[in-house]
């Protein structure tokens, strides 16, 4: 009885004390950004552990004992505020405060007026507080590491590598088909007919606020997912006004070392060119572009302008406008081995290759964000990107049946132009404290052209002491045109409902229901004009660097050569057309199981329809293949907050992987040393995903994390080499199962802060991934399900594109002079990936394997004063040899080898 009385007395005292507390609440805003709300600001009672971080709307609320206190408000890069106050029992005190950077500046020395989500610390705090497993990289970190495009940006995060020479990424060893790309949460089409995802290299980081990499599936995402989703969040200006101009120049050491840097004539240097098929091309010779290369000066440059302004219409109504336009180009040169061999190592083609290339990217972005009030906002985004690639290739060496004395020559000129146009409209509306509605829609178009690719094959005729044309097949000398147009419409609608309050008057549960729709069409056509050399000219001597002297209207009229397509005298192009429609309904229940444990239960239902129709050189009669699927995709996310610095997270889900249009169309794409052909029998894979993650946040801007992950894939898709003299590669469900297991480690740490005013700082970051992949390779399965009579070299093997070990590391030094607002930051960044399979071998041929590479970059960014900045970069300082080998049983044979050279850049920026 005595114990019972003491317990009741203690309970009453405790309740009485709790009821006597007061409440201090308010909103923290950014004085430098027109008093915009500041999320993730630390608000605490000085001298106690009673504190909280502001929410996404900058709001906070603390329970405080009666008496006199000091409210301490802090955020990295801003002056700390200390606000004395007194509070009484049961009193609610509102303290709204504005923070200013004052003499303290954030680390980003490129753009001072920006949304705080560009900041590394803000993104870390977002990662810490989120229920989902997130990994973000903001424009501040991209600037510090000297990253110029999104493809290279995402490789600075754990578990991601990029395929050499492309913008294609691998997430945890899984390639293009297993990943997805979105812009502001909405899908965007691919610019490459062979790829699912757009080339991330065409996105300049000038347009990026931050990039979110989701390696964990959630029910709001489309189910065509196994590796990761890259969501590019475009600039969203929140300052008063901004005008900034930046110009720069860059060079590649390989390119400038060439006395004669040669490109094909025709395309101009702006990247906006087109060469349509001439009139009556089979009965006359009137092609526009010359076959004679021209000398160029390989010094590149860039220019950009950014502008933003906020209009205040009174009350809470504001309009934020932001626009940026930029142009950049690059010259590259490489030379080395490029060949293909059989299982015994005998040469099929073996070349010394010289590759001259010139690329451009023109980018325009416009963003208008209108805020009716704190609860209702709409955004419009328009983006235009024009990218071009101009390549002049020269291959000298062995060609079976044509030049078996290493006396062959192939000259190939390729120009590609891609234009992406994106229109997005997004809205968010908080109807009540419990109900919110979010919606978004987009209309996108990508047009990709390869106008007038030229290829000529020759051999050195010793009898006549000069080069003659190869005449083995009609395709030895040709011009090729291709055009792709893809239109995509998407819509997202969702509603959140919060319910079940706890003792602290916070909602314990949130229900989200929604709909996603994605509707895509692709039209692709290609025409190749093959030049038949007449018998009388088969041994004629020609100048390989002035082929216009042979291929001209007069010689055509004289009958020296004729022109035909794969359809003979029919100019009708090869085509394939694709349609893909996805309807999806989803629901998520977020529930706080305990004060420290929160779970999100998700379920998504998708209806998928895909149809591909083609008429090509290997299936001239025309054909179509389609499939329909209904997918039910459960997901689970759990977060356990061990304490205010440690989190444990668990995620599990089921997803699928769709084949792409071109992978299923019987279309042949020929490169000089390899050929790719579609497989109409290709079908989707199923994926099962599991993640376990521990996070430790020693400070707001520091992180240590370890993740363990596993994936089980049913009917995985691979690229394999087929048994053919042309080294064909196709896309095939090669087995019944595949497995991926691995671990990721990341650390971001402030090493030391020093100087008389603590105005110097040394920081470091490291992330590493180790993984093991394995899959069944079943030749009998392939023979049963396709027309390919193949024998895979091994019964089990790793996934294509998967490196066992990935490492990214960086060290940064920062010095600031508060009196002049000047600063300097130097970053040394290192990246490494171990060996990875490029394509699986068949018929006893070994796998094609890309060898390990390590790269080192130095980036220096300085601010001389508030307006003027100077930036310098030196990249690829180690200049490693890029190698691909064929791993035959008898020996490893190098089939590709070159060096990229060093890259140097210098830029000047000025803010008005």
Image (spheres, rainbow, N blue to C red):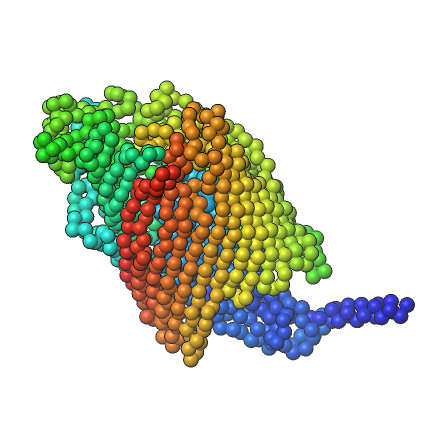
Residue found at x 86% / y 69%: 3
Closer-to-camera residue (29/110): 110
**How far across and how far down the image is residue 570, in percent?**
27, 21
Residue found at x 60% / y 70%: 44
Kindly give the residue lying farthest to the front in the view shown.
Answer: 890
**How far across and how far down the image is residue 575, in percent?**
35, 27
* Left or right: 603, with 531 as reference point: right
**How far across and how far down the image is residue 192, in percent?**
37, 39
* Left or right: 113, with 375 as reference point: left
Closer-to-camera residue (874/525): 874
Q: Quadrant of residue 660?
A: top left
Q: How many discs mark residues in the rendered view?
A: 0
Placement of the C terminus among the 4 image quadrants: bottom left
Residue found at x 60% / y 66%: 52
Closer-to-camera residue (241/653): 653
**How far across and how far down the image is residue 407, in percent?**
18, 36
Q: Quadrant of residue 540?
A: top left
**Is residue 141 something that shows in the picture?**
yes
């Amino acid at each position: 009885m005595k114990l019972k009385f003491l317990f009741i007395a203690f309970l009453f005292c405790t309740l009485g004390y709790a009821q006597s507390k007061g409440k201090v609440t308010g909103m923290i805003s950014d004085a430098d950004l027109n008093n915009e709300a500041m999320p993730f600001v630390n608000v605490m009672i000085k001298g106690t552990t009673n504190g909280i971080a502001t929410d996404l709307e900058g709001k906070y609320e603390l329970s405080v004992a009666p008496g006199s206190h000091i409210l301490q408000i802090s955020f990295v890069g801003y002056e700390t505020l200390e606000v004395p106050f007194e509070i009484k029992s049961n009193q609610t005190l509102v303290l709204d405060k504005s923070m200013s950077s004052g003499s303290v500046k954030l680390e980003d020395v490129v753009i001072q007026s920006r949304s705080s989500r560009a900041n590394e610390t803000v993104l870390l705090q977002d990662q810490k507080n989120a229920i989902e497993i997130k990994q973000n990289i903001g424009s501040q970190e991209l600037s510090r590491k000297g990253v110029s495009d999104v493809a290279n940006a995402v490789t600075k995060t754990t578990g991601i590598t990029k395929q050499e020479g492309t913008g294609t990424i691998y997430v945890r060893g899984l390639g293009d088909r297993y990943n997805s790309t979105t812009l502001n949460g909405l899908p965007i089409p691919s610019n490459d007919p062979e790829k699912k995802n757009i080339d991330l290299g065409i996105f300049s980081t000038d347009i990026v606020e931050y990039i979110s990499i989701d390696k964990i599936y959630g029910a709001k995402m489309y189910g065509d997912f196994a590796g990761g989703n890259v969501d590019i969040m475009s600039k969203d200006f929140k300052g008063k006004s901004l005008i900034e101009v930046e110009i720069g120049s860059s060079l590649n050491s390989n390119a400038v070392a060439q006395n004669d840097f040669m490109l094909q004539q025709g395309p101009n240097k702006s990247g906006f060119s087109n060469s349509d098929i001439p009139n009556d091309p089979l009965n006359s010779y009137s092609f526009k572009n010359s076959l004679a290369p021209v000398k160029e000066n390989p010094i590149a440059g860039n220019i950009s302008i950014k502008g933003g302004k906020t209009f205040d219409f009174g009350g809470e109504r504001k309009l934020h406008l932001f626009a940026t336009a930029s142009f950049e180009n690059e010259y590259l040169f490489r030379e080395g081995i490029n060949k293909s061999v059989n299982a015994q190592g005998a040469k099929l083609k073996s070349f010394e290759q010289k590759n001259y290339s010139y690329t451009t990217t023109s980018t325009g972005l416009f963003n208008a964000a209108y805020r009716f009030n704190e609860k209702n906002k709409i955004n419009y985004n328009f983006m235009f990107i024009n990218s071009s690639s101009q390549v002049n290739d020269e291959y000298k060496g062995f060609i079976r049946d044509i030049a078996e004395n290493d006396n062959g020559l192939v000259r190939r000129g390729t120009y590609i132009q891609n234009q992406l146009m994106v229109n997005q409209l997004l809205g968010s509306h908080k109807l009540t404290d419990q109900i919110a509605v979010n919606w978004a829609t987009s209309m996108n178009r990508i047009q990709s052209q390869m106008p007038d690719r030229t290829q000529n094959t020759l051999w050195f005729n010793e009898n006549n002491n000069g080069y003659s044309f190869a005449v083995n097949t009609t395709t030895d000398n040709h011009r090729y045109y291709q055009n792709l147009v893809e239109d995509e419409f998407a819509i997202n609608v969702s509603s959140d409902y919060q319910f079940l309050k706890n003792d602290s008057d916070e909602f314990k549960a949130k229900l989200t229901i929604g709909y996603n729709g994605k509707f895509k069409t692709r039209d692709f056509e290609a025409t190749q004009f093959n030049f038949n050399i007449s018998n009388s000219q088969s041994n004629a001597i020609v100048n390989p660097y002035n082929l216009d002297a042979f291929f001209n209207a007069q010689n055509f009229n004289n009958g020296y050569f004729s022109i035909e397509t794969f359809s003979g005298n029919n100019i009708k192009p090869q085509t394939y057309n694709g349609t893909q429609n996805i309807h999806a309904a989803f629901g998520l229940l977020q529930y706080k199981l305990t004060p420290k444990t929160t779970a999100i239960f998700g379920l998504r239902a998708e209806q998928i329809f895909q149809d591909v129709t083609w008429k090509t050189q290997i299936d001239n009669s025309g054909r179509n293949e389609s499939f329909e699927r209904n997918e039910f995709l459960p997901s689970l996310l759990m977060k356990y907050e061990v304490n205010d610095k440690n989190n444990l997270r668990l995620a599990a889900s089921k997803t699928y992987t769709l084949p792409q249009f071109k992978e299923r169309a019987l279309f042949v794409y020929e490169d000089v040393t390899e050929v790719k052909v579609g497989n109409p029998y290709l079908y989707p894979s199923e994926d099962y995903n599991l993640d376990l993650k521990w996070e430790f946040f020693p400070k707001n801007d520091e992180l240590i994390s370890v993740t363990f992950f596993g994936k089980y894939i049913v009917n995985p898709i691979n690229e394999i080499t087929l048994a053919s003299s042309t080294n064909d590669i196709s896309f095939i469900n090669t087995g019944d199962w595949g497995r991926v297991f691995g671990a990721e480690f990341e650390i971001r740490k402030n090493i030391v802060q020093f100087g008389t005013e603590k105005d110097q700082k040394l920081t470091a970051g490291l992330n590493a991934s180790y993984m093991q992949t394995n899959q069944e390779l079943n030749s009998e399965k392939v023979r049963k399900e396709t027309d390919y009579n193949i024998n895979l070299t091994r019964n089990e093997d790793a996934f294509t594109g998967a490196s066992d070990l990935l490492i990214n590391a960086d060290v940064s030094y920062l010095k600031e002079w508060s009196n002049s607002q000047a600063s300097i930051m130097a970053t040394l960044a290192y990246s490494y990936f171990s060996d990875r399979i490029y394509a699986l071998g068949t018929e006893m041929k070994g796998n094609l394997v890309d060898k390990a590479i390590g790269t080192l970059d130095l980036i220096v960014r300085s601010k001389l004063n508030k307006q003027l900045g100077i930036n310098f970069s030196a990249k690829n300082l180690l200049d490693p040899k890029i190698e691909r080998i064929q791993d035959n049983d008898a020996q490893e044979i190098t089939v590709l080898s070159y060096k990229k050279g060093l890259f140097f850049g210098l830029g000047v920026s000025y803010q008005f």
